[in-house]
Every structure is written in C-alpha cells, then in structure tokens.
Amino acid sequence: MSSIRYALLSLLAREPLSGYDIKLHMNGRIGPFWKVGSNQVYPELSKMEAEGLVKLQSVEQHTYRPARKLYEITEAGRDALIGWTLEPGGVENVRDDFLLKAYNSWLVDPEQMRTQVEEIKKRHEEKLAVYSEKVAELTARLDPDNPDDPIASTIPVAEFGVQYERLYIEWCDNLIKSFIARSSK
Amino acid sequence: MSSIRYALLSLLAREPLSGYDIKLHMNGRIGPFWKVGSNQVYPELSKMEAEGLVKLQSVEQHTYRPARKLYEITEAGRDALIGWTLEPGGVENVRDDFLLKAYNSWLVDPEQMRTQVEEIKKRHEEKLAVYSEKVAELTARLDPDNPDDPIASTIPVAEFGVQYERLYIEWCDNLIKSFIARSSK
DNA sequence: AGCATCATGTAACTTGTTACATGATTGT
DNA sequence: ACAATCATGTAACAAGTTACATGATGCT
C-alpha cells in the first residue's frame, strides 16, 4: 500500500522535522494510525533527499550524540505529495486479527471467548479516549478564520478514529451479549 | 501481524479445502477482509502439513492439470487454532491511505478533493452492498437450533463489515460537506 | 482466435517488524 | 544503580505484492 514515503512528506509539509521527530509524531499526530520503525524513516529520508523531495534545513550537533538533522520539504516534495493526494487509489481492506478470532469463536468455550472480547474492548476504549482527547485539543486550536489551516484537515482524521473506536466497542458489546446467550444453554 | 497461517486454519476448521479454494474463499468468506496470493498459500500449506496441523485428505488427478490437493485440519491443527484464538493480542491500527490523503487536503483545491472523496465513497458503497448481501445470506442459512453452528460466528464478522462501511460512507459525506463550505469562500 | 477458469507452484521484489549498536544526559 | 530520553543508523528476518510458468478446457 504504497508508501511511508507520503506519510513522511505529509508531516514535513506542515513543519520541518527530524527523523526522530517523525517517528514520534507518527504515533500521535496522524496516528495512532501509523507506526514506523527507524529502519524505514532514516533510509527513506536519505532517498528522498537524493531525489530532491526534501532537503536538510539544519544540523544540530551536540558532540556527545548523533547530529540532529532537520529536514524540510521542497517545492518538488510538495508537488509530489499533492500529486499523490489527488491520485485515485483503491479501497483498503480492514485487516484485524481479532475479527478472525471472532470468526473462530464457534470452536471455543463462550465463557473464555467473552473474557477475550472484554479484554480487547478495553483496549479500544483506551484508544477512544486518546482520539477524543485529540479531537478536543485540535478543535480548540483550530483557527476558524483561516480556511487553509492544516488543523482543519487533521480533525476529520482524528474524528474517524473516534467513530471507528465507538463502532468497535459497540460491536464488542454485541458479541459479548451473544456469548452470554450461548453459554446459558 | 502474525499469520495467514491461522486464516488458513480458520477456513479448514470448517471444511476441507484445496489451496486454490482457500485463495478464492479468502475473498468472499472471511473477506473481503483478507487477501492472499498463491505464493503464500501453497508454501504455508506444505509447512503446516510437515508440522502435522493439516493433512491431505485426497488428491484428485486430471492428467491435464496439476493435482487438486484437498487438505483437512488435524486434531493438532484445531488445537493450535483454538490456542491462537484465545491468545491475547494487541489492537491493530487502522491503516488506510485515504485517511492520509484527507490529512493532506489543506494543500489541495477543495473542488478536486471533493471529486476524490466521492470516488472512494462510491467504492465503499459497493463494499457495503457486498457485506449486506452476505449478512442476509448468512442469516437465512443460520440454523437457530444449533448453538455451535459456525455461521453464528461468521455473521458478526460480516456485520462488522457493514458497520464499518456505513461509518466510512458517513465520514465521506461529512468531508464532502466541509469541502463545499471551504470552496464557497 | 482469444480470454477466463482451474490448480499448482516459483521468483523477484517491496514492505514491515524486531532487535541491536552507540553513548552522554536526565530523572527516579 | 538503573531506566528513559535523545538521535542516528544497520542487520536479520517475516510478510506481502506482482508477475510468471504450465496447460487442457470451455466460453464468446
């Protein structure tokens, strides 16, 4: 599903960042959608620099640690990102191990399965809290006078997260109900 | 995200299948969630056979084409599947390119973005139709007297698909509204 | 004539995950 | 004393994608 490349550019289009920053932000800005390892970030940044999509803005050097390399997006990088954003793309599949586990629940003791669902429901409740918090925070920071405020594009993404987690939690509740019904037979 | 292995076993736990069958069913039974290539299915089946999780039930040979190898799950395979199903696992991230594109919409002409969203909304409506059809079909086939009918575990999975696609479509509608508002400035 | 279906499989390539390595500094 | 943070990166492995190869048959 073509590319962390564009995930990196999406962040850099908003502000200059180092590879390290990107790694952190992935798990809090676009995310908790995405996740990347340093192994993907650093080589990709180098590649993009070679292709002229990003360039080094500055390098902070503290002798005792690796230089902090701040990258900024170039004109070409913005264009590439805009091109990708407008490029038609297929729909992604939901691919969630737990759905597969639910598919197997007929094989399993309903009591144990209930425990299992309750566990992951809890996880999704935690995620819901994170997303809700994020929506609230972004909404407070949004400048309603600026029609091109990037935050206006961030809110729907976080909002999707909220909706998705609510859906998941509700779905878990229904599952739990069905296991209770089944175990009382 | 550990394993087609269990996806294959999940199907084989319900009925014996060939690698070819599995490839087809992935995109219509568990799915449209999953997708696999033959490159993953055939080697994995061989590996699992070597480990005793599945075994050959029969081999149909038509001289003019490769033998059709029907696999069935073994006791050990069922146990492994049950073990995995009850194993606690982390929550998955939603990872959808279009969310990232939406995150970039502040960079882009709202009119063009609207077209883009409408396109993918259409795709999700198609998927919704598929899932709804599936839920209806499964519900009709469900045996309500048998508390261990595997179909009872399939319905929630398809139902998740329905809910998810509805959520996605509604989200698209909200996005479209926001682009219309923005372009009329 | 040409393409889709059935049915196995391999090969080449791209992505993603986990773990490691360095090494001073700051907080517990 | 010990872990976490900052900051770069490499290496080994696991998983996923795309394309290819075989080759008769049946459909348009």
Image (cartoon, coloured by chain):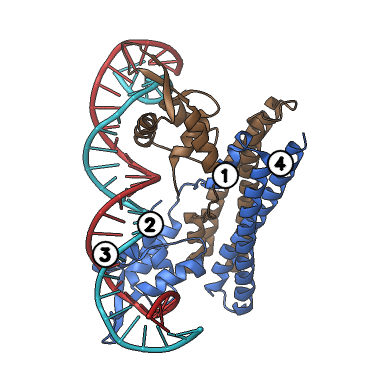
Chain colours: A brown, B blue, C red, D cyan
In the rendered image, the vertical position of residue A157 relative to residue B127, given as above or below: above
Residue at which label 3 appears: B47
Name the residue carrying label 4.
B179
Amino acid type of the residue tagged 4 in the rendering: Phe
Whether residues under marks 4 and 2 lie with C-beta atoms below 8 angstroms apart, the answer is no
Cα distance in 3D space between marks 4 and 2: 40 Å
Measured from the top left, where is residue B92 in percent x and y?
A: 49, 48
- Confirm whether residue A44 shows in the render: yes
Mark 4 or 1: in front is 1
The image quadrant that residue A65 belongs to is top left
Element marked by disc 3: helix
Q: Identify the residue position indicated by label 2 in the image.
A: B3
Q: Are marks 1 and 2 in contact (CB under 8 Å)?
A: no
Across and down, in percent, residue A37 comes to 39, 36
On what subunit does the disc labeled 4 rest? B
User: Along the horizontal axis of the image, is A104 left or right of A180?
Assistant: left
Report the front residue among B98 and A176: B98
Which residue shows up at 40% across the image and 74% down it?
B21
Secondary element at tag 2: loop
Q: CA distance from mark 3 to mark 2?
A: 13 Å
Measured along the vertical axis of the image, is residue B107 above or below residue B22?
above
Q: Which quadrant of the figure has residue D1? A: top left
List the residue tagged with mark 1: A86
In the image: residue A136, left or right of residue B71: right
For mark 3, does the 10 Å Cα neighbourhood hold few (<14), some (14 to 19), or many (20 or more) residues? some
Cα–Cα span, label 1 and label 2:
33 Å
The chain identifier of the residue carrying mark 2 reads B
SS for callout 4: helix
Which amino acid type is shown beneath numbered disc 3?
A: Lys
- Secondary element under disc 1, as helix, strand or loop, is helix
